């Protein structure tokens, strides 16, 4: 795929480019080989586990003695106003006063079905938040899910629903089968002693190929379900795209209907329906 002009022996400066190409290819090969061997070792050991209160997927700051659960926010010393507002937010959380809060690009999102409160969203670089705050697409997904449940109160009469923001970097749930893919959210639905677990990843897909492991994860997750063999558990996966379907139709050469079959939904153009598609994957009920 490299243009022939880049491989022509007409400049010593190109040696540096060839070196970078060789290193990139070698890194990719090693990563794939390692992933293959790790998957081979892990397969017999996969199992379902309950999430405990000290699960590493909850926001925490590592201390010498033990983790301290919560967010860590770094602020310039001169930003006294932000410090004051964040102190107010911390007090409100401690008092259980869960109300909308927003200041200087920092937003606290309260969603009662999420496993901890609040979720933080950051627009701009006025502070540094750890674990990483929600990005725009992730925030929109949470708000759209919240709006759907408020508009369809009967949906929760038959089932329980829980959401968890999935962390990365060794703390969240990742899948080596999909190039160490860490979906952004884990969504549980419990109904009649059966559990449906959906991995949801809001993202832009403009620079992702049709055969990318993240795109194909909707099939991979069903293979994992089959291997684990629990008839009371169903696994699903969805990509929530903030890239318009017409852009991907030109890039991939397939119709939007085919993308929907691959569990790719579109956050903006299908704002009124995509949450319902994600929630009802694999079942025949109506909200």
Image (spheres, rainbow, N blue to C red):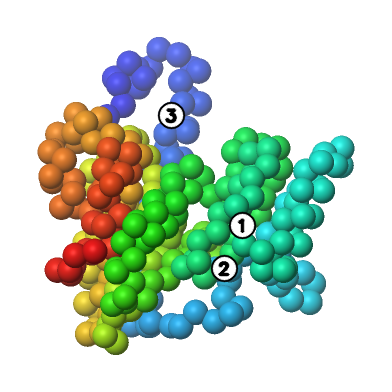
Residue, far top: 10
Alpha carbon distance from label 1 to label 2:
14 Å
Query: Mark 3 highlights which residue?
Result: 18
Q: Nearer the viewer, mark 1 or mark 3?
A: 1
Alpha carbon distance from label 1 to label 3:
56 Å
Question: Residue visible at 21% across and 77% down?
Answer: 226
> What is the quadrant of residue 131 in the picture?
bottom right
Residue 25 bears which disc, if any? none
Mark 2 residue crowding within 10 angstroms, few (<14) / some (14–19) / many (20+): some
Q: Observer-nearest residue: 229 or 184? A: 184
Query: Mark 1 highlights which residue?
Result: 99
Q: Is residue 17 above or below residue 37?
A: above
Indicate the quadrant containing the N terminus: top left, top right, bottom left or bottom right.
top left
Report whether residue 189 is seen: no
State left or right for residue 248 relative to residue 20. Answer: left
Earlier along the polypeptide chain: callout 2 or callout 3? Answer: 3
Contact? badges 1 and 2 (CB < 8 Å): no
Residue 188 coordinates in the image, percent (x, y): 37, 72
Question: Residue visible at 18% across and 33% down?
Answer: 249
Residue 102 coordinates in the image, percent (x, y): 64, 45
State left or right for residue 56 relative to residue 61. Answer: left
Query: Mark 2 highlights which residue?
Result: 116
């Amino acid at each position: 795929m490299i243009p022939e002009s880049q491989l022509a022996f007409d400049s010593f400066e190109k040696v540096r480019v060839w070196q970078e190409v060789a290193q990139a290819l070698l890194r990719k090969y090693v990563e794939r080989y390692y992933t293959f061997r790790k998957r081979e070792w892990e397969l017999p050991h996969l199992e379902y586990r309950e999430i405990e209160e000290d699960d590493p997927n909850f926001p925490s700051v590592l201390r010498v003695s033990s983790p301290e659960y919560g967010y860590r926010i770094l602020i310039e010393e001169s930003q006294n106003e932000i410090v004051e507002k964040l102190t107010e937010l911390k007090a409100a959380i401690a008092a259980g006063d869960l109300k909308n809060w927003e200041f200087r690009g920092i937003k606290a999102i309260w969603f009662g079905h999420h496993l901890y409160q609040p979720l933080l969203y950051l627009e701009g670089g006025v502070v540094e938040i750890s674990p990483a705050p929600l990005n725009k697409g992730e925030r929109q997904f949470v708000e759209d899910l919240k709006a759907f449940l408020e508009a369809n109160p009967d949906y929760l009469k038959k089932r329980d629903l829980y959401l968890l923001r999935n962390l990365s970097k060794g703390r969240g749930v990742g899948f080596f089968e999909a190039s160490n893919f860490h979906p952004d959210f884990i969504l549980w639905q419990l109904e009649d002693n059966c559990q449906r677990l959906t991995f949801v990843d809001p993202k832009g897909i403009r620079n992702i190929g049709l055969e990318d492991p993240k795109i194909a994860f909707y099939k991979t997750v069903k293979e994992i379900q089959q291997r684990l063999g629990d008839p009371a558990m169903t696994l699903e996966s969805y990509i929530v795209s903030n890239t318009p379907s017409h852009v991907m139709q030109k890039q991939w050469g397939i119709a939007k209907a085919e993308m929907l079959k691959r569990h790719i939904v579109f956050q903006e153009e299908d704002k009124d329906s995509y949450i319902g598609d994600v929630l009802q994957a694999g079942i025949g009920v109506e909200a």
